[in-house]
């Protein structure tokens, strides 16, 4: 019998192969309350909330309601759906499960802030700061809460502390907003210029700076910053409206309309946009188109008194005094202590031959705006026309005293000629004959949001006023209202107005 060939040494089996050192035989088991966190996170960032809720429910059931991350994501979903109170309770559960996590307390404070419980939110933020004293967001949010509580000093201190930890755009913008609420425009400009150094391409900062420079009358810097803003975002509606209003202010209505056309593609339902378009048509003598645009603006913002004011102004131009009375009365209901509205109402009433109510309207206009030269002069002329010579003389003396206290360079030659002519008529007792319809130059009071604008309005007996307004009102935050001078011969009137807005933060 032949012998079997020997087996090579390297092929001999010596048992199972040796395992590498420290290598586990299988993957470690994740804790039951953590093993689906990755899947919950994946569906959440995909905005697949229905599937995310199912997984959260299963995870909580498996972990006996001990999964912190499941509660956290569920609270985020509830808050996005608008259930703030439910989200608050879920975040509080997260804080109980992990009391050492500052993020849980931050989210609890955020829910309290959204519920307008600012004092409670500040207390929770302070607790979170004890766990993480280097988090700039906590200090920033404390400053925001103090701002809504009107504690501007504490708000500025918190925001400045946040900026010392980390330079960020949000804190700079909020700090500038507080300075604007304190009417300290120069300090707000300094803060935003500092913010621009660390974030030169921030569209919001560039736009806000442009609007503020427009507010203080520095048109060169305003146009520069607004242009840079539109360079980075050509569809920035706020910058487009502001630059268009500057063109409109300089009577370049066609260029302004071309800019507004771009903005209308992005925000076709903007009441400020349609108001400005309407006043551009008003400056181009297209009164029917102006009324159409202003009616559309009033449809989008029925409680905006400046739009109603402009509608009254255009109807006065077209000698539709009953319609003008309707819109001006509506505007007065929303702005009951604004003198120029009463002055325009007096014009409409005088043309409707309601002299008694016209006198009352003039008295209200003088009561709320005693430094308006045109109202004083028009009132004197109106009283003379209704044969109240003594009242006309007293009103004319008040107008002369106001004229003498003003800078003569800001008063047009037509107004000075009117003073001279009417003064001679008062002395001789001649009949006053209106050679051409008068116009009144007035300004609106500052609205709630920062917008700059100038109204030029009609009056019954005063000749055409200067092309430059006597004074200018600082801009306000949400609406751009363009108003014009009225001439009853339907000549185009001088249009003055600028827009600016600080976006809410």
Image (cartoon, rainbow, N blue to C red):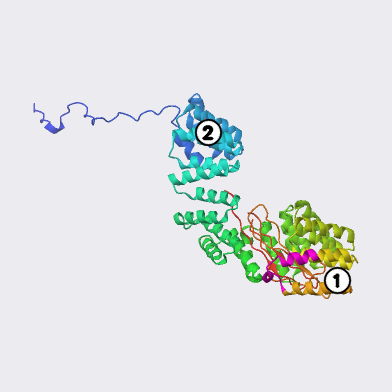
Residue in the foreground of this view, choosing between 461 and 230:
461
How far, Cα to Cα, is label 2 from label 1? 72 Å
250 in the magenta segment: no
Question: Residue 403: within the magenta?
Answer: yes
Residue at label 1?
A: 426
Judged from the image, the secondary structure of the residue bearing numbered disc 1 is: helix
- Counting from the top left corner in percent of width and height, residue 107 is at 52, 36
User: Nearest the camera: 471 or 252?
Assistant: 471
Q: Which residues are magenta?
A: 397-412
Does 205 appear above or below 463?
A: above
Q: Main secondary structure of the magenta part?
A: helix
Q: Do we see residue 49 in this rendering?
A: yes
Answer yes or no: is residue 457 visible.
Answer: no
Sequence-wise, the earlier of marks 2 and 1 is 2
In the rendered view, would you say 189 is above or below 160? Answer: below
Instruction: Compare residues 401 and 213 and report the one nearer the observer.
Output: 401
Q: Position of residue 459 (x, y in %)?
A: 80, 66
**Up-down relation of residue 126 to residue 450 (above or below):** above
- Residue located beneath label 2 in the image: 124
Quadrant assignment, res 390 = bottom right
Identity of the residue furthest to the left in this view:
2
Residue at 53% in and 54% down = 187
- Under circle 2, the secondary element is helix
Verify CB contact (< 8 Å) between mark 2 and mark 1. Answer: no
Left-right relation of 287 to 29: right
Q: How many marks?
A: 2
How crowded pointer 2 is (Cα within 10 Å; few <14, some 14-19, many 20+) is rated as many
- Residue 7 is labelled as none
């Amino acid at each position: 019998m032949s012998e079997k060939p020997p087996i090579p040494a390297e092929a001999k089996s010596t048992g199972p192969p040796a395992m590498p050192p420290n290598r586990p035989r299988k993957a470690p088991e994740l804790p039951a309350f953590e093993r689906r966190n990755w899947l919950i996170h994946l569906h959440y960032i995909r905005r697949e909330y229905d599937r995310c809720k199912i997984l959260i429910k299963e995870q909580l059931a498996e972990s006996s309601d001990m999964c912190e991350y499941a509660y956290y994501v569920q609270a985020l979903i509830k808050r996005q759906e608008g259930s703030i109170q439910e989200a608050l309770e879920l975040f509080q559960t997260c804080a109980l499960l992990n009391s050492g996590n500052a993020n849980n307390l931050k989210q609890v404070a955020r829910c309290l802030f959204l519920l307008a419980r600012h004092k409670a939110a500040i207390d929770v933020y302070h607790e979170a700061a004890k766990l993480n004293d280097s988090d700039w967001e906590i200090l920033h949010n404390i400053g925001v809460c103090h701002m809504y509580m009107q504690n501007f000093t504490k708000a500025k201190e918190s925001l400045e502390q946040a900026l010392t930890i980390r330079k960020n755009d949000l804190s700079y913008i909020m700090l500038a907003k507080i300075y604007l609420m304190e009417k300290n425009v120069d300090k707000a400009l300094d803060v935003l210029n500092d913010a621009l150094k660390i974030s030169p391409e921030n569209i919001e900062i560039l736009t806000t700076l442009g609007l503020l420079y427009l507010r203080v009358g520095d048109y060169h810097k305003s146009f520069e910053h607004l242009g840079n803003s539109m360079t980075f975002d050509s569809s920035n509606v706020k910058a487009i409206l502001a630059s268009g209003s500057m063109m409109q202010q300089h009577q370049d209505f066609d260029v302004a309309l071309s800019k507004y056309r771009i903005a209308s593609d992005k925000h076709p339902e903007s009441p400020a946009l349609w108001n400005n378009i309407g006043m551009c048509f008003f400056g181009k003598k297209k009164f029917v188109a102006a009324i159409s645009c202003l009616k559309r603006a009033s449809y989008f913002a029925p409680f905006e008194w400046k739009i109603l004011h402009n509608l009254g102004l255009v109807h006065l131009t077209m000698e539709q005094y009953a319609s003008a009375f309707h819109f001006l009365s509506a505007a007065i209901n929303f702005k009951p202590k604004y003198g120029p509205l009463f002055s325009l109402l007096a014009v409409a009433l005088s043309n409707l031959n309601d002299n008694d109510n016209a006198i009352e309207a003039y008295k209200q206009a003088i009561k709320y705006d005693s430094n308006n030269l045109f109202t004083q002069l028009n009132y004197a002329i109106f009283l003379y026309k209704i044969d109240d010579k003594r009242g006309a003389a007293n009103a004319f003396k008040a107008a002369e005293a106001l004229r003498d206290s003003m800078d003569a360079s800001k008063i047009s030659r037509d107004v000075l000629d009117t003073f001279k002519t009417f003064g001679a008529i008062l002395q001789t007792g001649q009949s006053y004959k209106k050679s051409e319809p008068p116009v009144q130059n007035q300004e609106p009071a500052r609205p709630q949001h920062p917008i700059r604008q100038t109204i030029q309005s009609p009056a019954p007996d005063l000749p055409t006023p200067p092309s430059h307004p006597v004074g200018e009102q600082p801009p306000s935050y949400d609406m751009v209202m363009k108003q014009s001078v009225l001439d009853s011969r339907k000549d185009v009137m001088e249009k003055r107005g600028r827009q600016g807005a600080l976006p809410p933060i």
